[in-house]
Amino acid sequence: MPRSQSWRMTTNPMEKFWPLAIATMGLILGGCGRALFYQPQIATGGINSNFAEEFPSYSGDGRYLAFASERDGRRNIFLYDLQTNQLVNLPNLNRRDSSQDQPDLSEDGRFIAYVSTERGRQDVFVYDRNQGRSQLLTVNLRGSVQNPTISGDGRRVAFQSNERGQWNLMLVDVTP
């Protein structure tokens, strides 16, 4: 009785490369050392709370850090002065009946572009710290908005809107 033998008719050409790929990855990861697996430090001194802090944004001069947090029971925007290590008061920005979110800072930290539900839907506003008031930028815009970003001088804001059925970029001039 003849013995049966099985022959592999096809082979995966990548099979012979797996050991080489694994060895190469070991060299790459080993060479990166701490840089690849660096553990960032958790910020302290008033920045973090027992609630989620999100959407961090540095001012261009590096002095201020804006972020959103629910530490007051609703989503609000906070500004942290990295020179004095203290939260900065933002009068008239955060409201009890709405959420403020996704802040972005101008170069010197004077202007903050953000998303708010103040009118019962998402809108983009710009807050002027010197004036202590906000300006609505999306008066007649339909649809959702997100991710506002302000120019360094605080004169222009770009954001995403799905007013036309897909996410598009919108540019708005800020009037003083």
Image: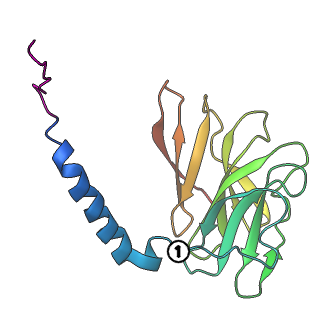
Task: Tally the numbered discs.
Answer: 1
Q: Quadrant of the N terminus?
A: top left
Q: Which residues are magenta?
A: 1-11
In the displayed structure image, the side of residue 94 where residue 8 appears, left or right: left
* 167 shown above or below 113: above
Amino acid carrying label 1: it is Tyr
Horizontally, is 132 left or right of 124 in the view? right
Magenta residues, dominant SS class: loop
Q: Where is residue 22 drawn, in percent x and y? A: 29, 58
Q: Which residue is mark 1?
A: 38
Which color scheme is applied? rainbow
Q: Quadrant of residue 98?
A: top right
Q: Quadrant of residue 77?
A: bottom right
Toward which corner of the image does residue 117 lie, by quadrant? top right
Is 67 one of the magenta-colored residues? no
**Residue at position x 90%, y 51% from top?**
73
Residue at 66% x, 38% y is 139
Element at label 1: loop
Position of 94 relative to 63 (above/below): above
x then y, percent, for residue 110: 67, 72
Residue 9 counted in the magenta span? yes
Q: Residue at x 79, y 33 (%)?
A: 120
Residue extending farthest bottom? 83
Q: Residues within 10 Å of mark 1 (few under 14, many from 20)?
A: few
Asked whether residue 166 is in view, the answer is yes
- Image quarter hosting the C terminus: bottom right
170 w.r.t. 151: above or below: above
Q: Nearer the viewer, residue 100 or 124?
A: 100
Q: Is residue 86 left or right of residue 35?
A: right
